[in-house]
Amino acid sequence: MVLAHVFELGELATLLNHLKRHWLVIVTISVSALSASELRVYVPVLIGRAVESVLTKGASSVFYYAFLIVLVSGVAGALQFVTTYGGQWLAQKVVYQIRKELFDSILSKSVSFHDSSSTGDLIARSTMDIEAIRRLIGFGAPQFMSTTFLIIASGFAFFGLGRIYGLVYLLTLPILLCLTFLLAKKQERFWGAIREKYGKMSKILQENIAGQKLIRSYAIEEDQVSLFEESTRDYVEDYKGVSFVRGVYTPLLTLTVSVAVALLLMLSGELIRVSEVGALVAAVNLYGTLLSPVRFYGQFVLFLENGRAGLKRVYEIERVPDEKIEESGLEASSIKGEIEFQDVWLEKSGKYVLRGINLKIRAGEVVALVGESGSGKTTLIDLIPRFYEPTHGRVLLDCVDIKRYNLRSLRRNVGVVSQDVFLFSGTLRDNICFGVENVSEEQLKNAVELAQLSEFVDSLPDGFDTLIGERGITLSGGQRQRVAIARTLLVNPKIIILDESTSSLDAQTERKLQEAIRNVISGRTTIIISHRLSTLRLAQRVVVLKNGEIVEQGSLNELLTKGRELRRVLQLEALSKV
């Protein structure tokens, strides 16, 4: 099977699985392409007969052939429309499914997958690579069928006109095909580089848009512009290489057809009789009809190569195992919230970031985690909603291995408010109610009030229906964190994790928020990551981490008196803000 030599087995299975659902459309396209090709070949034959008829019977006979030519051309055009439209319809249907499955696959991947993946590259796979698949199915494949049928039908037509025409056709066709495939081969290396550089360019663009404030704060706009210009320049150079190859080989194809026509004239010019002039005219017109389709073969190789590469890159994502979300398992809605880490080790990139963690947090207890950057605080709490799985050891929830819980149910009962708050480009209401259905106005206002956000909402012209821009760009850092806290409160989780959630708040707002948090965390298991003394005072116990290990734990007062590491971390934090 030819496709099996072009596509890898998994890619081929993926493509055929999408195509077989639309087999009736594929049959219709094939029949239309075959019929249109037959009629297109018949038009030059009719022109030849018209010329011959005029020479032998007079000009009056031309009207009959003119009518036939128009009729045949019209039917061929209608059939070509069916082929083209059918191809585009098929491509859109297939690509819709592939794009949907890719998006679903990306969302289903584990946190560790996204840690090691470039956002720009994932966007390139979802756009440029998907588009390459669409062009292959929608334009490349139907045109390939039409061209192949046309070449075969032309061969029969040439031999039908006379042996000499068939021989010239057989002599020149391999040259035409050789040139087209040579054209494609010369372009192939450029297209491979273009795909890579498009991904790199997308990555730089995405990072600069997302990090534009940081770029401005360091006044390095010109450096970033130069970096982007360099990646764009490489991209343009490869496209120029493609254009040069096309510029060289396309005239050669035209020249080959011209040589073939000249050869026909030389071989038959002196021997031709009046009755055979029509055959010569038909042969010349047939070559003219063949030129563009044969030239397309070179393009098709590129369509095939780009489509194959695009499908391969899409399949690479889908081949990575999705995060396993068990629909069965224990429901976490009735948990009390007791958490226990038993000899937990976690390895990332060949290095242990957590080492032998043994920690028990009672249900309803408020525990603070403290440590320098990279000490493993956030990684430790990421084990609770199972963003990562321990390399060794286990995590228990209410004395049950956390793996036995239904993952969706578990995550709905673990509320996380991180320092880096992500908001969607919708309304304030959409972001606060994210992931929660049928929220009443009373529930919404209560969550907003507890998060100390009521005054801000009242100041907005459209209240909860105010658009907040992409990533909440119109909100301050403190406002974004309070929106995230309100969002978490609305879920009403049994376990709350506050990861530096008060770091961007001013002192006055923080005091208000801490008072609200005291009421909210009552009866809930709460883990706080913070280096602010005012926030640490909310905790009943403080756990200090260093290099992935617990080095101190106890009450805040005990550690401030006896603990060395906590005091050292707090002193470093204080110095960093001086």
Image (tube, grey):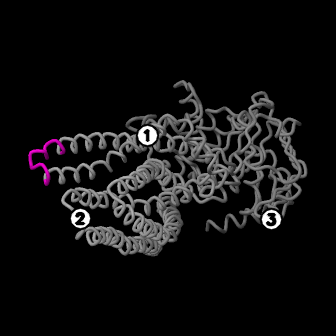
**Amino acid type indicated by mark 1:** Val
**Amino acid type indicated by mark 2:** Ile
Residue under the point 25% across and 60% down:
280
Q: CA distance from mark 2 to mark 1?
A: 37 Å
Q: Is residue 132 left or right of residue 498?
A: left
Kindly state the secondary structure of the residue where label 3 is placed.
Answer: strand
Residue 415 is labelled as none
Label 1 CA crowd tier, 10 Å (few <14, some 14–19, many 20+): some
What residue is pinned by disc 3?
351
What residue is pinned by disc 1?
31
In the rendered image, residue 57 lying in the magenta stretch gets the answer yes
Q: Is residue 303 left or right of residue 250?
A: right
Which range is magenta? Answer: 55-65
Residue 199 position in % (x across, y down):
52, 63
**Amino acid type indicated by mark 3:** Lys
Residue 272 is labelled as 2
Most common secondary structure along the magenta stretch: helix
Q: CA distance from mark 3 to mark 2?
A: 85 Å
